[in-house]
Structure formats: structure tokens, C-alpha cells
Image: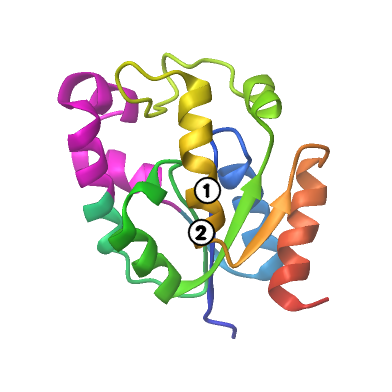
Amino acid sequence: MDKSNIILIGMPGSGKSTCGVISAKVLLKNFFDTDLLLQGLERSRLQDLIDTKGTDYFYEAEEKAILSLNIEATVIATGGSVIYSEKAMEHLRSLGRVIYLHMSYETMLDRINDLTTRGIVVKNGSTLRDMYEERLPLYEKYADNIIYCDNNTVEDTVAEIVRITTGE
């Protein structure tokens, strides 16, 4: 059995969780969502955590959750802000291949429905566009592979993940 991991990074709405679950089924791997891990560890919804304890606390808690991961043969969907922690990203890279699900700012806006409950970390005084521009080079820095998802269906993106992973 292939014990390697696939780590999906990208903007909110890029399809990390949705495509991750389906990819895991196709590749006969487990699926793990680090946002759910963080919610479980903190016993709080992501948005509540951001609202009550602030973004700095959120980043620290996210880093701690990521550093606790010790899994194999898994497709891992990460939170969009994971790339702010070099330690977390180096740990994820040590666990497997990092695939960046890239999309344009416009596509992200189309896909994100409810900003108030989604748990998107936007620093005080920043706009969604600022967040997008700030994160873009970080995703590119840590990616082993990039999939351009603007015109993809879920199935298209899953097929690309499988192709990258298996070489087929």
C-alpha cells in the first residue's frame, strides 16, 4: 500500500475538502481535514475562534494542530491560512506532496458564499483582495505542484490530483 500523503493547500473555496474526499476514495487513502482537527482541539467553530480570540491566537492554534499530525496514506485538506506558518508547512512537506489548488480572485469570490460563518482569516483592516494577494506567493512557495482550478469541475480537479499522484 502507498503510505505517502497528499497535502492540499489553497484559497478558501478552492475545493480542498471537496476534492480531497473524492481523491482519497479514488486513491484508496484516508482523508483528513485540518480545519476539523483545529475545531476539535479548540472545541470551537473556526469563525468563533477568530472572533473571540483573534487572528494571532488562531494562527498559533492552527500551527500547533498541524505540528501534531503524524499520519500516512492520507489526503490532507488544510485551512487556507496554514501557509502563514513556516514550521507547519515544513512539517506538511515532510509528510508528503503539497498540491496547490490555484484559482483567480474572481473565482474565489464566486465560490465563497457566506463570509461571516466560513472561518476565513482576514487580518484587521485588510480586505479579501489583500488576503488573496498576500497568500498567493506563499502558496506558490510551498507547492510541489499547482493545479489551475478556475474552469475545472470537481471531477477535473480530482483527475489532476490523481494524475499528479500516480503519474497516470
Q: Quadrant of residue 59?
A: top left
Cβ–Cβ under 8 Å for marks 1 and 2: yes
Amino acid of disc 1: Pro
Amino acid of disc 2: Lys
- Find out whether residue 22 is within the magenta segment: no
Q: How is the image coloured?
A: rainbow
On the picture, is 51 further left or further right than 128? Answer: left
Overall secondary structure of the magenta stretch? helix
Measured as percent of width and height from the top left, residue 153 is found at 81, 40
The residue lying at 24 percent from left, 36 percent from top is: 58
Residue toward you, 54 or 35 = 54
The residue lying at 43 percent from left, 43 percent from top is: 79
Q: Is residue 159 above or below residue 154?
A: below
On the picture, is 101 further left or further right than 78? Answer: right
Measured as percent of width and height from the top left, residue 54 is found at 20, 26
User: Which residue was labeled with disc 2?
Assistant: 141
Q: Which residues are magenta?
A: 33-62
Measured as percent of width and height from the top left, residue 67 is found at 26, 62
Distance in Å between CA atoms under marks 1 and 2: 6 Å
Q: Quadrant of the C terminus?
A: bottom right
Answer few, some or many: residues within 10 Å of disc 1's Cα (few below 14, many 20 plus, some between 14 and 19). few
- Find out whether residue 50 is within the magenta segment: yes
In the picture, the disc for residue 137 is 1
Residue 142 appears in the figure:
yes
Residue toward you, 155 or 128 = 128
Answer few, some or many: residues within 10 Å of disc 2's Cα (few below 14, many 20 plus, some between 14 and 19). few
Callout 2 secondary element? helix
Residue 43 appears in the figure:
no
On the picture, is 74 further left or further right than 47? Answer: right
Q: Quadrant of residue 105?
A: top right
Measured as percent of width and height from the top left, residue 55 is found at 25, 30
Callout 1 secondary element? helix
